[in-house]
Image: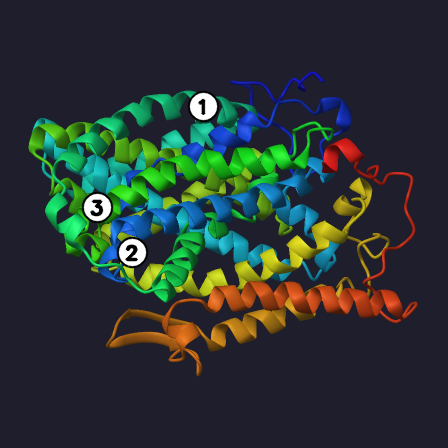
Amino acid sequence: MAASQDDRVGAVETRGIEPVPDTERHGHPGQMFWTWFAANISILGLPLGAALVSFRGLNIWQAVIVAVIGSFGSFALVGALSIAGKRGGAPALTLSRAVFGVRGNAGPTLITWLSRLGWETINTTTAAFALLALLNVAFGVRQNAVLTVVCLLVFIGCTLLISGLGHATIMWINKWATYAFGVLNLVVIAFLAATVAWDKVFQAPAGPVSAMVVGTGMIAAGTGIGWANAGADYARYLPRQIPGRRLVAASAFGAGIPLVVLISLGSLLAAGQPDLASAADPVSAINAMLPSWMSIPYLIAAFGGLLLSNHLSVYSAGLTMITLGIRVRRTVAVGLDVVVTFAGGIYFILIAKDFYGPFITFLTLLAVPITAWVGVFAVDLMLRRSYDRVALMDVSRTSRYWFRGGVRWSALTAWVVAIVVGLLFTEAATSSTDVWFAGPLSDTWIGTKGLGWVVTLALAAGVYALLRRLGGATAGADETSEPPLSPHTLPEPTAQETA
């Protein structure tokens, strides 16, 4: 099917969160491959691999296995959840109205938006540091307040241009920019690989199997889980007849290939640079390992990788903002988003003395409710027959997704219960002496190994599945049963689609 006039490369996408009609669906699963390849090509994947060796005690072979399972597995989940976008033609958090209810969806949407803003601020600030370092290495220009603002504006301007134009331009940029920055990354990777202390690598003893389990969870939580509530945003223009398994494969391989390479290299480097895993500014830490002539391609690659990830996040944040109820055009939502991240970058670079530790600690806490949402949404997707395109946009009491008081209590209950239990196992701290939050079970094996998110995910899915089953078994007793289909309901997926 032909693309609509506004969903073309270089044209401003005027569509907001409203579902894409079947007549305007176009594209192929390969677009999801490039989407997630671009999001994970950043050299910042190296510290993840270093952590497997420095903190978990794994050898290189165990680290590679963990990288494969954690990366491919978590992004297979991203691909599976993106099937909802293909079915319903709407962004993930808009489709979530059908799961949580018009009002009940406000909590997951707000948490998602705050998390997106937070990670965009991290990307923006880190990219500004990379650009400042590049100017210093290439031209001898020292950092100052004015130059810092200029570097922030350059990165934000690039992000705004790509995210503002919208879906078609993002898909095009993801593919071709990945080639350019991918080559730069390969050059840097080849040089870094030559600095590896191979004797130490091969002499390292194997770690316990339990450490591999924990490491797999760490990689999954640090990569695919964070993008799980964004996959549908980029799959919503794809034709419904595309088999779901192709989306899963494209997402898993698109992200898995660069992540496994980078995480494996990080594991190798940790043998000679154990401090890499705990570096507050990983861009600077890796740059310090390179000669000045190699710093230029490295810093360009770092800047480009952060940009490719950030424009995806900003695009999704804009759609999430509209879903939250802020009635603006998508382009305006994107603009408001980058204004907030610009202000955050100014504060964190020019005012705050230390921001990485406290800020990432805060974002770690937000990951608990996001993981709970993934569990509920995944179960609903497996059980759901269809989405009603009119009801998705109707936030009044007449909406099919109003349920009881605007809330689907089975989904919201499962979400809240999973959050509470997940926080019991969670500790958020910048150091051993600066603990922001510590759940009463955070000192148990699950808590100390960072597996609270696994408990959150499993509990959210299990409680919701149980409540749905109880609601279906008791006629009219629970609002989890679907209302009668309306004439505007999207048709049930075909056998080819679900194959």
- Crowdedness of circle 2 by 10 Å Cα count: few (<14), some, many (20+)? many
The picture places residue 164, in percent across and down from the top left corner, at 50, 30
Question: Which comes sooner in the sequence, label 1 or label 3?
Answer: 1
Residue of label 3? 268
Q: Is residue 471 left or right of residue 62?
A: right
Q: Amino acid at mark 2?
A: Leu
Between marks 1 and 2, how big is the CA–CA gap? 30 Å
Q: Amino acid at mark 1?
A: Lys
Residue at 91 percent across and 68 percent down: it is: 476
The residue lying toward the viewer, choosing from 313 and 223, is 223
Give the quarter of the image for residue 78: top right
Q: Are marks 1 and 3 in contact (CB under 8 Å)?
A: no
Label total for image: 3
The picture places residue 68, in percent across and down from the top left corner, at 41, 45
Residue at 59 percent across and 26 percent down: it is: 13
Q: Is residue 439 left or right of residue 124?
A: right
Q: Is residue 307 left or right of residue 270?
A: right
The picture places residue 409, in percent across and down from the top left corner, at 74, 68
Residue at 37 percent across and 36 percent down: it is: 258
Give the vertical position of 426 relative to 355 (above or below). below
Is label 1 or label 3 in front? 3
On-image quarter of the N terminus: top right
Give the vertical position of 345 relative to 151 (above or below). below
Between marks 1 and 3, how big is the CA–CA gap? 28 Å
Question: Which comes sooner in the sequence, label 1 or label 2?
Answer: 2
Q: Does residue 340 appear anywhere in the picture?
A: no
Question: Element at badge 1?
Answer: helix
The picture places residue 464, in percent across and down from the top left corner, at 70, 65
On-image quarter of the C terminus: top right
* Mark linked to residue 52: 2
Question: Element at badge 3?
Answer: helix
* Mark linked to residue 175: 1
